[in-house]
Image (cartoon, helix red, strand yellow):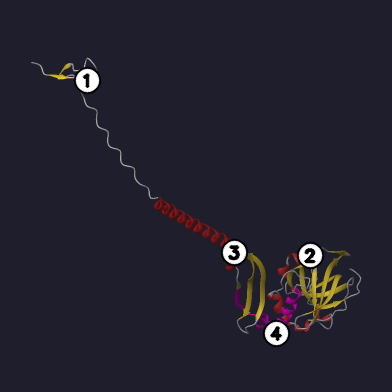
Amino acid sequence: MLKTKKCPECGTQNQITNIFCPTCGYCFVPEPEKPAEPAPRETDSRGEHRLFKGVTVAVIIVLALITGLASFLISREIERSRMVMVETGTIWKCSECGNIYKKRVVTVEVPKADSDNYTVEIVEGKCFSCRYGPEVGRYQTLLESLSRPDTPLSSTVEMQPTAAEFLGEHLELFPAEDVALVRDIASEADPRLVERDFEQFAGKPIHVTGKVVASEVIKAGDGTEITYLRLIPVMGGQELEVVFLIVYPGVSGLLKGDVADCYLLPVDQVKYQSGDRNVSAVLCIAMFMSGGLTPP
């Protein structure tokens, strides 16, 4: 006999293998139980407030640190880029007498961050007095006095070695009492060649005639008076586009506009200010000069 099961809904006998009742559709397979929902958790409003407050404080601290660091970096860059005045250049100190015989130092404005790159270097050597004698050293000092801010030269002056040697050996010619003392030793050089090939004429006496375009008595640092002349050489009745700057040891009677007969020792090639331009010129020490001549 087949086993049956009774439908709990309609009472119909069903085969034991039936899943649904054919009469009412009842399902004999039980539905799975739903898991129990967790009981609602009581919230701690005071704990959440403390957590929020802690996070806020931490964020404020981090922002303050970032702001402080940024301000420090910005202020440091501003400080580094600030312009400062520094000295740079070279000082030459005599290894024998200890005197500073040459100084090429300037003051420049640079960013503070680069200021350590600018220094004043001290170099040892021998001054003109120790190399060629005190009188030559005095003449070098006189020449350097021409490159002060209140004088016409815009470049420093340093007597060429050949000129210093000639000067030291013929001090009696600076200045010469008579033209006869210098006439035979001075060459009739073309002033244009003297300017162009200065090294060939440095320290060699020359004879030049020209027009005085400036004359000024300058007092050197030791109180010595020297006459500073600017001469435009003249050849064939024509003024040349060459400039001679002449230093006469004493007060010369030559004035602006005079035509002068000059016996000179070229000592250096320099720059001088002409208006807003720097012009190259031949710097000479005069041995003998006379004026009031007719241009050749």
The type of residue carrying mark 2 is Arg
Q: Which marked residue is nearer to the observer: mark 4 or mark 3?
A: 3
| Precedes in sequence: disc 1 or disc 2 | 1
Q: Magenta region: which residues?
A: 121-146
- Judge depth for marks 2 and 3 and give the one in front: 3
Q: Which mark is residue 9?
A: 1
Of circles 4 and 1, which is in front?
Answer: 1
Which of the two discs, 2 and 4, sits closer to the camera?
4
* Percent x, y of residue 85: 65, 69
Disc nearer the start of the sequence (1/3): 1
Please give the residue where the numbered disc 4 appears in the rendered image: 134
* Residue identified by numbered label 2: 192
Residue drawn 22% across the image and 27% down it = 30
Gap between marks 2 and 4, in whole Å? Answer: 33 Å
Estimate the spatial distance between the alpha carbons at disc 1 and disc 2, rounded to whole Å: 139 Å
Give the CA separation, mark 1 to mark 3. Answer: 95 Å
Disc 4 is placed on an element classified as helix
Q: Amino acid at mark 3?
A: Glu
Residue tagged 3: 79
Where residue 45 appears, x then y in whole percent?
A: 41, 50
Q: Residue at x 39, y 53 (%)?
A: 47
